[in-house]
Image (tube, coloured by chain):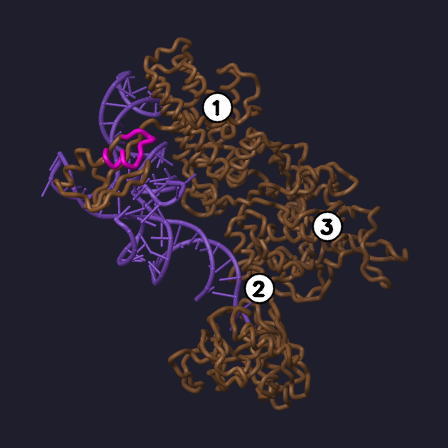
Amino acid sequence: MLPYPSGDLHIGHWYAMTPSDARARFMRMKGYNVLFPMGFDAFGLPAENAAIREGVHPMKRTFENIGRMRKQMRSMGTMFDWEREAVSADPAYYKWTEWFFIQLFKAGLAYRKMSPVDWCPNCNTTLAREQVWGEDRHCERCGTPVIKKDLEQWFFKTTKYADELLNFDGIDWPQTVKTLQTNWIGRSEGASVTFKTEAGDPIEIFTTRPDTLWGATFMVFSPEHPLVDKVTSPGQKEAVEAYKQQAARQSDIEREAVDKEKTGVFTGGYAINPVNQERIPIWIADYVLMSYGTGAIMAVPAHDERDFAFARKYGLKVIPVIQPEGMELDGDTMEAAHEHEGAMINSGPFNGTRATNDKGIKNPAIKTVIEWLEERGIGKRSVNYRYRDWLISRQRYWGAPIPMVHCEKHGWNPVPDDQLPVLLPEDVEWKPTGESPLKLHPTWKQTTCPICGEAAVRETDTMDTFMCSSWYHLRYLSPKYNKGPFDEAEYNYWMPVDTYTGGIEHATMHLLYTRFFHKALRDIGITEGNEPMLQLRNQGMVLGEDNEKMSKSRGNVIAPDVLVEKYGADSVRAYIMFFARWEMGAPWDSQGIEGAVRWVRRVWTLFTDPASRSASPTVGSDETKKNLRRKVHQTLRNVTRDFENFEFNTIISSLMELMNEMYKAREAGAAGTDEWKEAQEIYLKMMAPVTPHIAEELWTSYLGKPYSIHQQAWPSVDEAAAKEDTIEIPVQVNGKVRGKVVVPADASEDEIRAAALASEAIQKYLEGKEPKKIIVAKGRLVSVVV
RNA sequence: GCCGAAGUGGCGGAAUAGGCAGACGCGCACGACUCAAAAUCGUGUUCCCUCCGGGAAUGAGGGUUCGAUUCCCUCCUUCGGCACCA
């Protein structure tokens, strides 16, 4: 994932990028043509906020930051292909961001709508739902709690792809990300059922439990529901108005507090339950949200916890319609809603039907009731989502302009292709007014209608920067291409992305947007296949030494530049790969890095020491040479496997172990032998992806090999050499290890058993008794039961 | 409340098919080198005991198994996500 050019690379960037780089280098040595690109997600709020604060133009600041970060990245020794660099704030880039917007608009996937939207009062802009986090509903960027505003904004129809986004077939993504996305989309299966007011107005509701329709004893509308005024009786008007106003005053946070006691008011109106023609009262209550489902619910207090609490508080009727086995529910005396399985009762034709705990039509009661509803035209099977369309308008300057023009006569139309890009004006005053700065520019918005040529006005909002990052992988293909967003030949050669790495914090933001984007483009005919990124891996987070999230205010930030200055890039890379499981992350340990530094230094010594470079080997024993070779090839096997699996910490461990073995072999006189030379070569090749600089130096200057080690093929394991001749097998007596026997590696079960029984230690424990049972796990262990 | 991830020495972590728990490293202790220190090198380092030898231990408890860090059940803790979602 590309970084945001915030200023300096922090240790988190190193943690994300260097293991990923090592793996890219490994894949290159394995013979793949590897495209390992880098770019900058360069639009966004921080640069603009800094402009407001300090008066520096966002463009200037952003490109200065990019220059600095590029330099720092070079110090990491990464193999980024800088010829493919893409910067989203570059007009040659955002021209195509705008173009993509127009393609989505033309395909009917971008639309404008007035609706209550989340507004960050600090960033002075709207936010997508995905960018509102936590219980207090705060802005993902600045942490300020958001408020609601009614605004007309641009949306992308992400919900059109809700079902497809739930399908992860064909991609190798972490289960966690798949689960987060699945929960975010929040699909529930059920039925939509149409109740009627006494006046005959239809009231559509969604329910996951159509099998409890006969237990609906009242209805609840959200205070904002359009029918509220119509159903309210004159006598209740005052109370209803008061409640509506009070609800409107409350923030979302207050309204959504779970532990809050439910409140509501009777409207005086009644609805007719279509399954049994019962006349049931209509209430309004703020526990029913206008933003989910239809804003109206049927309340089944006997089988829903919330409805039950509400019914008891206001003395409403409770009628059980699902009878659990061996228990008789009584609506007047029951103390909690029964939300589980049972047999349907009080439900006309369905009495006795079994309701299971399954959701949707897997539940036989739900299935048959839905069929019955459909036959009668009262309701139908229906699916509801938590997922909302993506709000992409931002009332900010530093983003890609939304390339739309509004004409009094012809409404909204896209800017013609030959006028793209709509460039950001440079002479803008940044004021935190809550209005888009582009709106306040004296001339920028004035243009002509693409249809009639009359005076018209540009859209002055800019796009969410997640729009820019939804397609950047395509720009990497051909960042200088100007006939389209990318060169099709490059697309056909490289796409889709084989391996994608980055933080999990983007699970329901970027990683969901980019999947939507790809699918939309596929349907438009621009991309191919169902998914943009085949394999995803997430790194964890590096915490401060105090085990807290790194932040300037805590003063626990680790600056990589300082480490590189002190230890060198290779040591920092090695430690980053070594100190934690990559996908887990861990707190930083300033002392721990010494281990990686020592390793690098000891490898250096091992290769450069005159004792290691002896041309006349002194080794007498074949055993030493054989053991060295065995260890080399075993290590190679492990390191290869670990690179493939993103298990970087054990790569370093294995290399440390082999180094220790090589020191011992050298003591035993192995230096200068063919086995020693092979060990050295393989060692450096394994090390090359991790510590590219030192590996190169040792390869060319000390082994005298031709430049470059990074163009060498990854060595292959000699399985015969890696094989052990003899193995030591632990022998357990009653589950405890009591001895060990050494047998040939290919010993048969019988031979192992015999050796185990003959061993002194085991004889001692047997005390002459016959063992009850002997289990031989070939090559692993013998277990004797006495 | 629901969903997910995790819990192993003083610390980071390893155990990749249910088979020797603690690899590798940090730290610490002792030793060598040094006038001394740092660096370097070497040895040791889960805990407990009566230190010969034995016992206990992978968040807690239970189960399956000859054998469980690994599989199953119940629970606890931490982190992340969602949350009056009908």
The residue type indicated by label 2 comes to: Arg
Instruction: Tell me the distance, in whole angstroms, between the alpha carbons under discs 3 and 1.
Output: 56 Å
- Give how far across and how far down residue A271 sits, in percent: 61, 85
- Give how far across and how far down residue B10 sits, in percent: 30, 42
Q: Circle 1 sits in a helix, a strand or a loop, which is it?
A: helix
Question: What colour do you see for chain B?
Answer: purple
Q: In the figure, the brown chain has which letter? A: A
Is there any visible trace of residue A75 in the rendered image? no
The residue type indicated by label 1 comes to: Leu
Instruction: Tell me the distance, in whole angstroms, between the alpha carbons under discs 3 and 2.
Output: 44 Å
Is there any visible trace of residue A289 in the rendered image? yes
Mark 1 and mark 2 on one chain: yes
| Tag count | 3
| Residue neighbourhood size for the residue with mark 3, other residues' Cα within 10 Å, grouped as few (<14), some (14–19), many (≥20) | some
Residue drawn at x 53%, y 44% as measured from the top left: A537
Residue A370 sits in which quadrant?
bottom right
Give B77 or A360, whichever is nearer the viewer.
A360
Give A229 or A146, whichever is nearer the viewer.
A229
Per the rendering, the mark at residue A684 is: 1
Look at mark 3 in the image and give the residue it sits on. A429
Q: Residue furthest top?
A: A616
Mark 3 and mark 2 on one chain: yes
Q: Quick one: label 3 or label 2, which is nearer the N terminus?
A: 2
Instruction: Tell me the distance, in whole angstroms, between the alpha carbons under discs 1 and 2.
Output: 52 Å
The span shown in magenta is A743-755
Look at mark 2 in the image and give the residue it sits on. A187
